[in-house]
Amino acid sequence: MRARLLSAPSAASTASSLPSAGARPRRAVWRPRGPGAPPPPPPLSLRARASMQPAAPLPERQGVPPVHGVSNTVVGVLGGGQLGKMLCQAASQMGIKMVILDPLQGCPASSVCHEHVVGSFSDGDAVREFSKRCGVLTVEIEHVDAATLEKLEEQVPYTQLQDKYRQKKHFSKFGILLPDFMEVDTLHSIEEAGERFGYPLMVKSKRLAYDGRGNAVAQKKEDLSSVVASLGGFEHGLYVERWTPFVKELSVIVARSRDGSTVCYPVVETIHKDNICHIVEAPAEVSAKIKKSATDVAEKAIKSLEGAGVFAVELFLTEDDEILLNEVAPRPHNSGHHTIESCYTSQYEQHLRAILGIPLGDPSMKAPAAIMYNILGEDEGEAGFFLAHQLIQRALNIPGASVHWYAKPEMRKQRKMGHITIVGPSKASVKLRLDKLLQRDTYDPKKASPRASIIMGSDSDLNVMKDAETTIVSAHRTPERMYDFAKSAKDRGVEMPKGIPVATIAIGNAENAGLLAVKMLASRDPELTDKVLKYQEDLRDMVLEKAERLENIGWEEYLK
Amino acid sequence: MRARLLSAPSAASTASSLPSAGARPRRAVWRPRGPGAPPPPPPLSLRARASMQPAAPLPERQGVPPVHGVSNTVVGVLGGGQLGKMLCQAASQMGIKMVILDPLQGCPASSVCHEHVVGSFSDGDAVREFSKRCGVLTVEIEHVDAATLEKLEEQVPYTQLQDKYRQKKHFSKFGILLPDFMEVDTLHSIEEAGERFGYPLMVKSKRLAYDGRGNAVAQKKEDLSSVVASLGGFEHGLYVERWTPFVKELSVIVARSRDGSTVCYPVVETIHKDNICHIVEAPAEVSAKIKKSATDVAEKAIKSLEGAGVFAVELFLTEDDEILLNEVAPRPHNSGHHTIESCYTSQYEQHLRAILGIPLGDPSMKAPAAIMYNILGEDEGEAGFFLAHQLIQRALNIPGASVHWYAKPEMRKQRKMGHITIVGPSKASVKLRLDKLLQRDTYDPKKASPRASIIMGSDSDLNVMKDAETTIVSAHRTPERMYDFAKSAKDRGVEMPKGIPVATIAIGNAENAGLLAVKMLASRDPELTDKVLKYQEDLRDMVLEKAERLENIGWEEYLK
């Protein structure tokens, strides 16, 4: 849609569908609350609940026109980048009206919103004027004018999360583990911190830090003054963090509804490159125990805040299986892009549900595995567009891959220009497809994780197992324990204790073992189910044909 | 976005992103071709292929700016209803620019397209003028001005599918089975047809027939003249069809790329009410054989046509398992709405891929089952909005349900206002959720299809099987054959022939049988997988704990 300047609104901008000017927007941003504070009471005007239970039907109110569709409320978004665009796409599906405040004509969200107001979200007057156009206000980026937001809704101490140092202080007060940190404001204090935390030492600016900007590493004491200078000096507001040698970076998207209830998305692993999100794997390949503690930490962090919406909780997994909080972003997040294709409710629809007071949707995955790859600018201008298009062309040839292109007017190096999500029946298959996308490897059957493995007690079984028509792979990656188990199983007999079910098949019938494995896999693989059904029908037809032939010609003739 | 009148284009309407006026649009509509005609050669300007193989990278052409994102081509759509809207939503994700021609200000697609031109698609001048704005032209509705389309691209005999009688003649020429039909133009000829086909007799108008409009049934000879009058008389163009007592109505969405290659979506069942699509079940519950013949018929029908895009092939399944073609719609279709949530590539993205010459995407389902329910106007005006909102509120409480609201300005009885798609891990679960949505039934565990069934040879097994913690359901629905089989299995021993794998578990250990069933189901159910992993980890921890205790205290103390 075409953009319009805030300073010169046309008659159409006050279309009847928008709420009357001067109405105070309902709060849709979060605020930290003090430890032990009770959850805020649900707003009186809202009846929907954030649970899976059916809400009581709204009684028809005399004279009040009924809701047309999902909601009559116009949602205002500060920022019209890719997050705003994907929020608008989710809104379009549900028929929810979106208005965007962004200084850039032709910003990504401008083509899919109901109205784009050209103005700066760091300009208090623009934000105030904009807020009159919408029934609920939300943010797409963290760098909005906090003072203005506070004036709009006095009880929102927005600055407390915006300032990363205050954010950390808040969470540590709630007993959430995070890397050791301390404020530094002189060369003396940072040297002290270096002595306490050791080197390398992470130096960070308190504000406007994202995608690796505002972070720098001092390898030794002598680096400190140059590192401080590179971050704009102490007057910019700095703090340091103990270097965390993490095993994996994890992320949990938590949605919090207006009544305080929360739902958590599956834990994902994020892989960064040059401090920018590069790849997201869903679900993360960690134990159920780690998944649980990551989810617990994330939920605890969000429950310590107030307000509604989707939050991203970035975490470190340490060598000792400890979960440390890295930081929290109060908005839809790069680590949740995959949810558009892989989850029952995307993080964008979820954010809208949360801020509008609609019951939260099911956050679980509807497909077994997904992988998200960011399309980052590899070069400036047209050369960068050319390279991105080559990547996209490969993606368009990969089954299960969805291409998102944000349509940003300008290409820049390292800029997020789009992303590709690959969804598939297993983690192994989506990883293989990612390899294909990135031309990292030619296909190697030995590298492909098999969907069913056969463990043999001795090579004398090989003669039988070959009927299963399975590629027999070397067992050198099988953990020693599994090998021992398989070796000793023969001596112990096939009987297994309670809790370890083992399927056994008639002796010498490997074909049936293979078929059983396929049937197990087919239980939730529609394509495989079709093949199994086809096989069974063919088998039945063959048997019926033989039976008919037997009846027709008699057994003596048949045996000839 | 705001609409603009075609007659008064503003300066912005000729934005640099749009192709220069006068350029002929590439053809994106279909045309029937003669029997035996070779497939049309691929357009020279296109290199992408409609297969899953990677396309060769485009060589960088001197002086030609590279593609920004997926495609630089602007897509024009004749019609801005819900199909146009969902097409625009798919385009927005891929960053493809869409322009819409529709007479209605605020039509559904207007809020999500790049530009909405207000004009009639049955007005030749408007269509011609509109076509200059886009690089490729497609239709959302069938009632466009065919003569104009033919003038734009002379070789497109668009009328041949638009006229349902000519459509049927075309397909029968290609050996595709369809209900008997004949043209009628006098009372005498329709009476003759009635004698030949018998009663009830289906009377149809050749054009402008959709959602049951243009169809009428004559129960007996005496009804004929009033039925003909209700359809506007013989001068309107009528034909009759033999009454088809079908078992099910099926539909197959077929995508055909610019190079003639096709992919088919899974066969779905469509359930109509008052001749309007009411519910769509994906995949259809029919045998693999019937799925195959339905897909074969659909593919054959589309291969007899030319042009690129997505086509819906509506089919009848007869009592004799015969597949008859009902009709073909040359566009995305109500029976393919579910693909947005349930398939790797939605029918809308697929249509864009097909008309733009991008390789076709994977049409298979990424989740095991989906069900689509149309939100039809139940009343006029505000009363209708109130009822629709009540339905939507229930949908928002159902896991796996996605609400689509088309945001049509006016509510009318029987009008398609939106739809709800429920995706889930099994057909039984999505059906149960639909029942909940429609408040058709309270939950009845006997009605819920179990995910695992236990068939016992005699009630003496019951004592063992109760450990599996399974609801034991009455077997009265089990086919007789299955009962006989189970009864005789005991006598025959457990050995099964090749092709029928049977998992056996240690005698007296029903808990393991239950666990095995759960593990099978978990192989592609992420939620269940998590639970199984958790169970196994707990089990391991318990064993390790016991082992540690045993080592610490010695076996004599342990046994106390």
Image: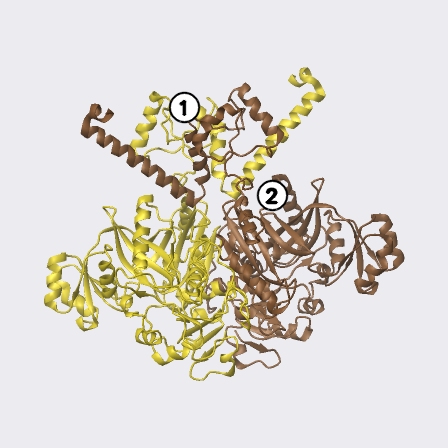
Chain colours: A brown, B yellow
On screen, B542 above or below B104? above
Q: Which image quarter: residue B411? A: bottom left
Secondary structure of residue under mark 1: helix
Position of B189 compared to A342: left or right? left
Which residue is most to the right? A188
Distance (Cα) linking label 1 and label 2: 40 Å
**Residue receiving disc 1:** B461
Chain at tag 2: A
Q: In this orientation, does residue A360 appear?
A: no
| Residue located at (52% from left, 20% from top) | A493
On screen, B216 above or below B484? below
Q: Inspect the image, locate mark 1, and give the three-letter code of the amino acid beneath it.
A: Asp
Q: Nearer the viewer, residue A518 or A210?
A: A518
Quarter of the C terminus of chain A within the rendering: top left
- Counting from the top left corner in percent of width and height, residue A200 is at 80, 50
Query: Same subunit under labels 1 and 2?
Result: no
Secondary structure of residue under mark 2: loop
Which residue is most to the bottom? B8
As drawn, the label of residue A285 is: 2
Q: Inspect the image, locate mark 2, and give the three-letter code of the amino acid beneath it.
A: Glu
Q: Within 10 angstroms of label 2, few (less than 14), some, or many (20 or more) residues?
A: some
- Counting from the top left corner in percent of width and height, residue B25 is at 41, 73
| Residue located at (41% from left, 38% from top) | B450
| Residue located at (32% from left, 74% from top) | B154
Which residue is most to the top? B556
Q: Nearer the viewer, residue B460 or B484?
A: B484
- Counting from the top left corner in percent of width and height, residue A5 is at 60, 78
Indicate which label's residue lies in the foreground, 1 or 2. 2
Q: Which image quarter: residue A126? A: bottom right
